[in-house]
Amino acid sequence: MATSSYARTLPTGEALLAASRQVWLAGLGAAVVSREWAHNEAGQVFRTLVREGTAIEARTFRIVGDGIETGFTRANALWRRTRDTVTGTVKAYAETATTLVRETLPRNLPKLDLPATLRRVMPPKAKAARAKRAVKSRTTRAKTAAPRTVKRAKKRATKRA
């Protein structure tokens, strides 16, 4: 109580100086006490804090990991369901469009006859000869390609060895 009456008797400027000095002295006292505490007792407290922090960190990681895993599972299920829905809808629309084109469109289109100059009419013998030449050229190409493929394979094998 002596300090409070002492502060009341001093003028304002002196009271401020006294208060700041008291704060300074309190800070010095706290530093000495904390230094002694750190020297004597802080090691055990610090180890206890580290142990508690480690336990909380492990629990937090487990909880967050479970949440993330649940989120991924839900997202994958939603993705699959969405993909199936979109695929089914697109198939249904494609089938409807195909049916429409096959059934409705040919009936509604007018029949057009091409002029004889635009039509290319081939006699049946010419068609057969053309098909024969096409088959022959395909087999010839296949025969010439086979030895080339064998040569390339041998060449690659010798390079690797």
Image (tube, grey):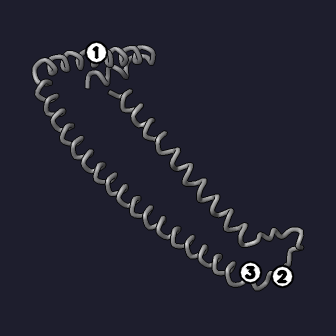
| Distance between mark 1 and mark 3 Cα atoms | 100 Å
Q: Which mark is residue 127?
A: none
Quadrant into which the C terminus falls = top left
Identify which amino acid the numbered label 2 is placed on: Pro
Q: Earlier in the sequence, mark 1 or mark 3?
A: 1
* Residue 28 located left or right of residue 42: right
Q: Which residue is mark 2?
A: 110
Residue 150: x, y in percent?
A: 43, 40
Q: Answer few, some or many: residues within 10 Å of disc 1's Cα (few below 14, many 20 plus, some between 14 and 19).
A: few
Question: Element type at marker 1?
Answer: helix
Residue 128 to residue 56: above or below = below
Question: Element type at marker 2?
Answer: loop
**In the image, what residue occupies the spot 73% across and 67% down?**
126
| Distance between mark 1 and mark 2 Cα atoms | 108 Å
Residue 14 to residue 97: above or below = above
**In the image, what residue occupies the spot 19% across and 37% down?**
54
Q: Which residue is mark 3?
A: 105
Q: Nearer the viewer, mark 3 or mark 2?
A: 2
Q: Which residue is mark 1?
A: 25
Residue 107's quadrant in the figure?
bottom right
Identify which amino acid the numbered label 3 is placed on: Leu
Q: Earlier in the sequence, mark 1 or mark 2?
A: 1
Q: Nearer the viewer, residue 49 or 81?
A: 81
